Image: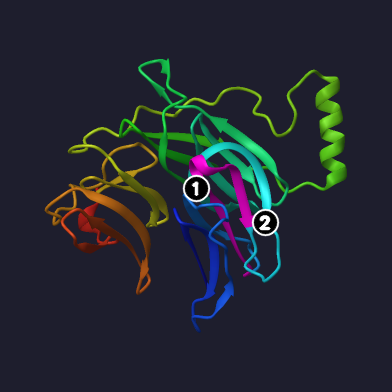
Amino acid sequence: MVLAAGGDEQGVAFWDFTTGELISGTTFDGLYIAAVAALDGGDGSARFVTCSGVHWDGVMVWEPVVGSSPVELPESTVDTLGTGRFGGRSLVVAGTRECVTVWDVDTGERLASLYTEDDGEDTGDERIHAVAIAQQGMGLAILALTDSGSVRVWVLPSPRPVRTDRELAIERLKRARAGLPDVDEPDEEIEPIRDPFIGHEGAISTLAIAVVDDRPVAVTGGTVRVWDLADGRAVCAPLTGHRDSVRKVVTSTLGGRPVAVSAGDDRTVRVWDLAPQSHYRG
């Protein structure tokens, strides 16, 4: 198990989580880190993706090996990242100052560019605070939390199987002859599938994804709430206990059960069991 970390004063570094040994360090003149996320390669290998916010444009993909160099995904200013693996592809979702983009890390292919909207007006320059990705039926659900506290949801078709360089070259040639966009450009703008989640008590400041009873749900805070991605409705009453606003929510499993962990301005950390049927609509 490998731990990756960085911050406003230094670039990314990697540690062996079991022994505490530093695998690869960083100098203080390296790229500052705005966000870091673990990337599942499907074969047990450890990789990480990082972004540097206003310090540098783009996304870096790292292997925590001494002397290795990161792979760059060209992008505008990126403040937040999400990762997932679907259809044999390792995917990165990047929240930029212009939109949300989805990348195949192994091929460097941009799969989608998604723009937020508010009351029919383009708000693509609105800052994205958090992003997440989950499987939704046969497609992919992409979530983005914006400056205004809105959570936008898009559903993309499942990515095509990974193609060889020759297959990509042939498809690019066919699309160019037909006057179509390149394979790493979306054919048309993809709209959010519904209005933002409704019913939060105060602003939403964080989001995470979990799978409960084989269905994806979103967990959000200010107050902690759980949403069914299939219909956008809250699946239970707010999870109360924090005495102030929740700043961070993450999801995991504990004893084989899906849980959410929340931290708030009341200086407490709470663990919520997402599995009990009493939490959910029939």
The residue type indicated by label 1 comes to: Leu
Using the image as rendered, state which of residue 126 and residue 145 is in the foreground.
Answer: 126
Residues drawn in magenta: 44-61
Do we see residue 133 in this rendering?
yes
Residue at x-position 19% and y-position 37%:
202
The residue type indicated by label 2 comes to: Pro
Where residue 246 sits: x, y (%)? 23, 50
Using the image as rendered, state which of residue 174 and residue 24 is in the foreground.
Answer: 24
Residue at x-position 38% and y-position 51%:
208
Where residue 280 sits: x, y (%)? 25, 51
Q: Is residue 118 above or below residue 222?
A: above
Count the numbered circles shown: 2
Using the image as rendered, state which of residue 31 and residue 280 is in the foreground.
Answer: 31
Mark drawn on residue 81: 1
Q: Which residue is mark 2?
A: 70
Main SS of the magenta segment?
strand
Q: CA distance from mark 2 to mark 1?
A: 16 Å
Which quadrant holds residue 160? Answer: top right
Q: Is residue 108 magenta?
A: no
**Pointer 2 or 1: first along the chain:** 2
Q: Is residue 208 above or below residue 190?
A: below
Residue at x-position 54% and y-position 26%:
190
Where residue 66 sits: x, y (%)? 67, 71
Q: Is residue 268 above or below residue 189?
A: below
Packing grade of label 2 (10 A; few <14, some 14-19, many >=20) is some
Using the image as rendered, state which of residue 57 and residue 104 is in the foreground.
Answer: 57
Q: Secondary structure at mark 2?
A: loop
Where residue 210 sits: x, y (%)? 39, 55
User: Which-is-in-front pick, marks 2 and 1?
Assistant: 2
